Image (spheres, rainbow, N blue to C red):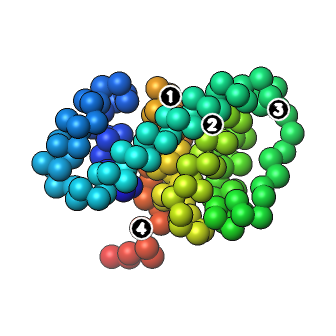
Amino acid sequence: MFEVLVYLYETYYRPDACPDSVALAKKLSAVGFEDEEISRALGWLTDLAETTNEMFSQHARQTAFSFGSRVYADQEYEVLGTAAIGFIEFLESADVINTLQREIVIERACAVNESPIPLDKLKVIVLMVLWSQGKEPDSLMFDELFGDDEDLGPPVYH
């Protein structure tokens, strides 16, 4: 699923540049993605849009002026893990995401059903949340989000 999401991010500069879901599924299949992966990714994106609309309509006033700390429920802590929570707090303190976006990221991360969620997958979720809202992180934050620091392995000396 995450490979499909990254492909969409890299291929379509805005969500509204994507074709309708039927045409998009055909294109993704032609590129070589499995039908199950495509279905999961498109379902996840549909749920992202619904979550975003719900959060902005119901919680905009509540969180717009929130300056407190976020306390994570035990279930959220188990699903996210320490590294993901630390990264989310870093993004919020760096003003990459706001409080509403943080809640959307948390909800979408919990929907992945992987515990704890790997940091590389959380980064894709953050990118997709920002992409779905037509926002793009600055170049330094983009490098942090899209960097493959976990796959670098030990240094190689020549």
Residue 114 x/y as whole percent: 53, 67
Residue 103 x/y as whole percent: 67, 42
Q: Is residue 117 left or right of residue 27?
A: right
- N-term-proximal mark, 4 vs 3: 3
Along the line of sight, which residue is nearer the eye, 102 or 148? 102
- N-term-proximal mark, 1 vs 3: 3
Tell me which amino acid carries mark 4.
Answer: Asp
Along the line of sight, which residue is nearer the eye, 90 or 114? 114
Task: Give the labeled residue for mark 4.
Answer: 151
Task: Examine the rendering and report whether any part of residue 140 can be seen.
Answer: no
Task: Give the labeled residue for mark 3.
Answer: 66
- N-term-proximal mark, 4 vs 1: 1
Residue 108 higher or lower than 54, as above or below? below
Q: Is residue 48 left or right of residue 23?
A: right
Verify CB contact (< 8 Å) between mark 1 and mark 2.
yes
Image quadrant occupied by the N terminus: bottom left
